[in-house]
Amino acid sequence: MGDIFYILRYTIPSIVVFLTAWFILKEFFQQENKRRHSELMSDRMKVSLPLRLQAYERLVLFLERISPNNLIVRVYKPGLTAGELQKQLIKSIRDEYTHNLSQQLYISPQAWELINRSYEECIGQINSLASDLKEDASATELSQRILETDLENSPTRKALDYLKSEARRSF
């Protein structure tokens, strides 16, 4: 019986010291992992934040460039027929779109969906307005019709407003 007390006299303090050290080390390693994770996230943000911001900037520019007013000013040339202007407007929109396809990596799926919808609706709007004209209509007639459309409810305006609000929330 004395041997058991003798063994317990040294074993219990050893177990207490071991458990204390184990809990302290466990807590230390958890804190160290959190710190490393925080540093890693900070490093990622240093790289990804400028890329995301650039994506928002490029997509805002894309939406501005395909908006009816800006598109007509850039593409219109005197002497074109409505059909020729229609083809050039659609080509310009498609070129802008393909140039900015990779930016979808840096924005939300909802924002990208609005940009896609805007792209498709702009082309559809131009085709619809052009189809209402006579075959021999001038580019001036088509451009006037496009410019007379309701700009407040344009697909580019909706997408632009959403993109700006998302960018403000993200940064």
Image: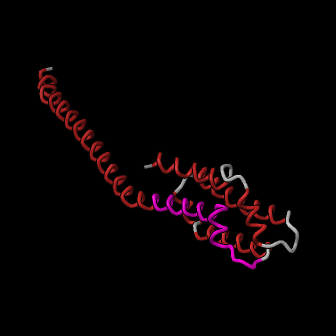
Q: Pinpoint residue 54: horizontal percent, then vertical percent.
A: 46, 62
Depth check, front residue: 48 or 162 = 162
| Residue 82, above or below 44 | below
Q: Position of residue 55 (x, y in %)?
A: 50, 61
Q: Identify the residue shown where x is 76% and y is 61%.
A: 145
- Residue 51 is left or right of residue 118, and the answer is left
In the picture, measured across the screen, residue 17 lies left or right of residue 35, that is: left
Q: Nearer the viewer, residue 10 or 168?
A: 168
Determine the image quadrant of residue 125: bottom right
Is 98 included in the stretch rendered in magenta? no
Residue 42 pos. (x, y %): 34, 53
Q: Nearer the viewer, residue 118 or 116?
A: 118
Specify the quadrant of the image occupied by residue 139.
bottom right
Q: Which image quadrant for residue 30?
A: top left
Residue 67 counted in the magenta span: yes
Residue at image position (16%, 24%) is 4
Q: How many marks?
A: 0
Q: Which residues are magenta?
A: 52-80
